[in-house]
Image (cartoon, rainbow, N blue to C red):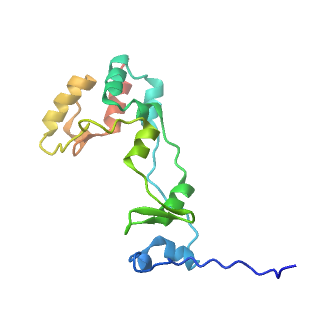
Amino acid sequence: MADNIAYQLDPGPLESSVLTEQITHRSRDIWDVSVNMILNTRRCNGKFWDLVKKYPIPPRVLEVIQLSGLYGVYRSHRPMIDRSLITSLVERWRPETHTFHFRTGKATITLQDVEVLYGLPVNGHPVLDNELIRTIGDWQNICQRLLGFTPCPQDFNHNSLKVSALNAHMLRQP
């Protein structure tokens, strides 16, 4: 019988000249056994999806979502957040090479991966462009035309409509 020798894993990078940020990388703390915590992620409270459940999206709006090619995202509903998985991926992400370093090799997420997972179109004109030239008044007009109500200026966060404004509008509906 072979001797029972404990397997020793060398967690350090094989080629230190490539991974120049190793000293400050999160994985360094794990290799030094000084951290054992799951990362805290931004919270998705699901209020938007609760609204969609309570007030189904009208067929006219669903048609626009389908025409824009974003129906796959809508159909995926509220994402479940696996903080342990996110923590593991953060620990394996290397900003120097823009890849994940796994034991089986390097990997990255491509535009084609996103296209397949969400059914998003990646050919053609972009859905959004640089909207810095639009004013809050322009956005209010767009909301009136597309959503049927005009939000107050404080209901915007830069060029984004706050979900709370949409929520308040929906709750005022009969």
> Outermost residue toward the right?
1
Q: Where is residue 123 in the image (x, y as percent from the top left)?
A: 30, 37
Q: Residue at x 77, y 81 (%)?
A: 5
Q: In this view, does 3 lie to the left or right of 114?
A: right
Q: Is residue 14 above or below residue 80?
A: below
Q: Residue at x 18, y 32 (%)?
A: 140
Q: Position of residue 51 (x, y in %)?
A: 43, 29
Q: Position of residue 138 (x, y in %)?
A: 14, 34
Q: Residue at x 37, y 23 (%)?
A: 62
Please give the count of numbered marks on the rendered protein: 0
Q: In this view, does 52 lie above or below 127?
A: above
Q: Where is residue 136 in the image (x, y as percent from the top left)?
A: 16, 38
Q: Which of 27 and 107 is in front in this view?
A: 107
Residue 6, picture quadrant: bottom right
Q: Which of 150 and 121 is in front in this view?
A: 121
Q: In which quarter of the image is the C terminus?
A: top left
Residue 124, picture quadrant: top left
